[in-house]
Image (cartoon, coloured by chain):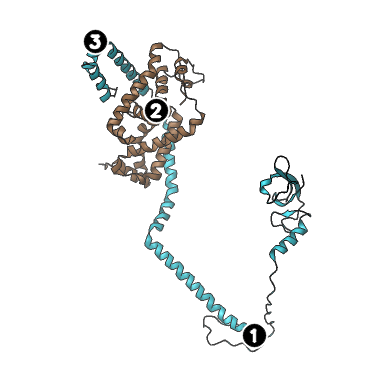
Amino acid sequence: MEPIFSDADLLQRAMAGDEAAFLALYGKLKAGIFRYAFYMTNSQTTAEEVMQEVFITLLQEGDRYRESRGDVSAFAFGIARNFVRRIERRERPYEQLPEEDTRANLAVSESLAGHVIRNQTTERVHCAIATLPDHYRQAVVLCDLCELSYEQAATRLNCAVGTIRSRLNRAHTMLAQKLKPLRNRQPLEATGTEGCLI
Amino acid sequence: MNCQELHNHFETNPRLDADFPPAVVSHATSCASCSRFVDEQLALKKSLQSLRESAAEAPDTFDARVLADFRMRGLDAKPTMLSLGHISSSSALRWGVAGAAALVIAAILFTSTRRAPKANLQTQTRSGAVASVSSDATPLVTPKVPAPSMKPKRRVIPRPVPNRSAVASNRLDNRLPAGFRSLMYCDALTCSAPMQMIRVQIPSGLIARPTPSLVNTSGAVNADVLIGSDGIARGIRIVDF
């Protein structure tokens, strides 16, 4: 019977060069971190970049992890959050923020050949989430999209459970307001990623 | 359930991934404003659900990339960890320092004991007497008696130390054309090839005391710069505007 290691043990072993431990830890954290990075950046390439950096940082700076401050997953999420913020700062000078009205009226077709046409509602919801203030966006991404519990989200964002609840409620109200034009105009023409410039 | 209670419910349970309780649904059917609100929440719930279902997955090739990173790090990290282990051991560090200090002391003692008989020997040969080892010489060093055919060592006469800057300027004067001030050491090796002269404009603020005749209207000063064959500026001459 194989011994069962905690995530903290796996991290220690991975840092010591144990490939099996690293793969086990990677398998546990991979999906959650990728989804978080993808929803936060709306880009698969950037999500991959974030994930790679997270695992490199975990191996390099894993000794900074303290079990008393949360699980390894929360530690990895913290690293991912920092990378996402860094990328947002890096990309900010080049991005064009979508305006509410123009975005609602926008009917941009997928211009890049070979791209799979994505669902317009999904894209617009993604855009609406992207325009939320950061702390509301974090709550929506962690609770609604990554399907974490309030407690897990609170640990990752280092705040109280009540704060998560109120942020999520406020974020839903804002999202509902932003998506109102979408509901009134349905069915809409196909739109693409160009409408969402996060 | 009344309207306030319905809103309170969504404030305390903002998650939209579960079905709404029957009390909420029944109130929404009887209240127009709450019905709109619940519809909005329902639409948002569907939107978030569709977004969740459309989530991208990391490609399989990515796993291999991360694993390659891990393996590469393992190769890089091992020697580092080894060396850090040695350094972090305080006793090893102490022994190392002590050993180095002992080596330095031994080297100093060795060189001092070697010089003493030589000096003694030199004075004796200079006077022309037969060399003899002084009694305080250490037995480790065997004094060498010079053969009669060997010349006695030349007496070193201390020469007056020449002024370095004067020498340098003399040399530069030979290498640089008249009126140029040296920017860098210039000798036969470094300035042997013909040099190129270019005219540049430099801000007058860089000149210590720029006279008004030198400064042009844009506040710059013209200067000729001599560029050596190695591309390094060797001399400069301020020219009148």
Which secondary structure, mark 2? loop
Q: Nearer the viewer, residue A115 or B195?
A: B195
Mark number displayed over residue A133? 2
In front of the other: A127 or B130: A127
CA gap, disc 2 to disc 1?
Answer: 94 Å
- The residue carrying mark 3 is B30
CB under 8 Å between discs 3 and 2:
no
Which quadrant of the figure has residue B171? Answer: bottom right
Picture mark count: 3
Chain of the residue where label 3 is placed in the rendered structure: B
Kind of residue sitting beneath label 2 = Pro
Q: Where is residue B158 drawn, in percent x and y?
A: 68, 75
Q: Secondary structure at mark 1?
A: helix
* Left or right of residue A25: residue B241: right
> Which mark identifies residue B125?
1
Colour in which chain A is shown?
brown
Q: For mark 2, name the chain.
A: A
Query: For the point 56% across and 82% down, which residue is it?
Result: B142
- Residue shown at 59% from the left, 80% from the top: B118
Q: Nearer the viewer, mark 2 or mark 1?
A: 2
Residue occupying image coordinates x 56% and y 78%: B115
Looking at the image, residue B106 sits to the left or right of residue B49; the answer is right
Disc 1 marks a residue whose amino acid type is Thr
Q: Distance of mark 3 from mark 2, alpha carbons?
A: 35 Å
Residue B205 appears at what percent x and percent y? 66, 47
Instruction: For the residues labelled 1 and 3, say whether their Cβ atoms are less than 8 Å apart.
Output: no
Q: Which chain is cyan?
A: B
Image coordinates for residue B161, horizontal then vertical, percent: 68, 70
Please say whether residue A8 is visible from this viewpoint.
yes
